[in-house]
Image (cartoon, rainbow, N blue to C red):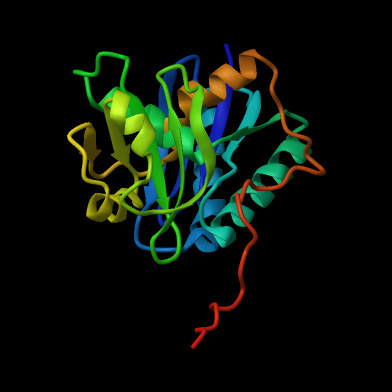
Amino acid sequence: MATILNIETSGKICSVALTRDGVLEFDIDDSAGMKHAEKLAPFVERALEEAKRREWDIDAIAVSIGPGSYTGLRIGLSHAKGLAFSMAVPLIGVSTLQIIAVKAMFRNLNFKGNEVLVPMIDARRMEVFTGAYDFALHPLWGPGAMILDKDSFSELLDSHEMWFMGDGAEKAKEVIKSENAHWMDGVNPMAKDMMALSEKAFREKRFLDVAYSTPEYLKEYQTTAPKNHL
């Protein structure tokens, strides 16, 4: 019976959850903006206090590893590494795109199971981080960065019902016009949504190297705005 501390800081919401054998035991989040550096440590402390109160040992630390906010991912992974090292427990990395996809699976009870899930994370201009997954989370496209246009996912849309979600999906709605394209609003990655993925990784012993693991940015981070070419 594994007790896992889950950390999600890839986007605007900072969240922490304590899960144990398929049950959400504690969660806390802040959606007031990018305050991860301020909020994460106190949230973790409250989760650890809850585990101590129930006399549970932490068996692993799980953290979202991207794609997402460069700063948020670095804060989350750095804190998770420190916890895993100090507590001598494994470190689990969870794809942010898969967190969104799994959350969508559980939200719509009318899915037949043959639909394609397309989580999207907003990037610059008409660009998103995205991937297309079946219900076993096998990638049918990506994951990677995509500049959206009218032909995005056109081959898959010709033969599949596709559901788009995440904070980048609103931009896709502007350009993707297909009867097979469907939209799910308000699906943001949170620590409590990591449970199925982090527990599966723990059972399969898929752990990160605490010293050398890095976030999955999916493209090079730009520190300056691109120049306009006349």
Query: Does residue 84 appear left or right of residue 56 in this picture?
Result: right
The answer to whether residue 218 is above or below residue 96 is below
* Location of residue 90 in the rendering, given as x and y in whole percent from the top left corner: 72, 28
Snapshot quadrant of residue 111: top left
Snapshot quadrant of residue 4: top right
Between 197 and 174, which is closer to the camera in this rendering? 174
Query: Does residue 49 appear left or right of residue 184 in this picture?
Result: right
Between 29 and 113, which is closer to the camera in this rendering? 113
> Residue farthest to the right?
211
Snapshot quadrant of residue 24: top left
* Location of residue 70 in the rendering, given as x and y in whole percent from the top left corner: 58, 59
The answer to whether residue 186 is above or below residue 174 is above
Q: Residue at x 56, y 45 (%)?
A: 66
The answer to whether residue 7 is above or below residue 20 is below
How many numbered marks are there?
Answer: 0
Query: Does residue 118 appear left or right of residue 174 in this picture?
Result: right
Between 113 and 26, which is closer to the camera in this rendering? 113
Q: Residue at x 49, y 48 (%)?
A: 43
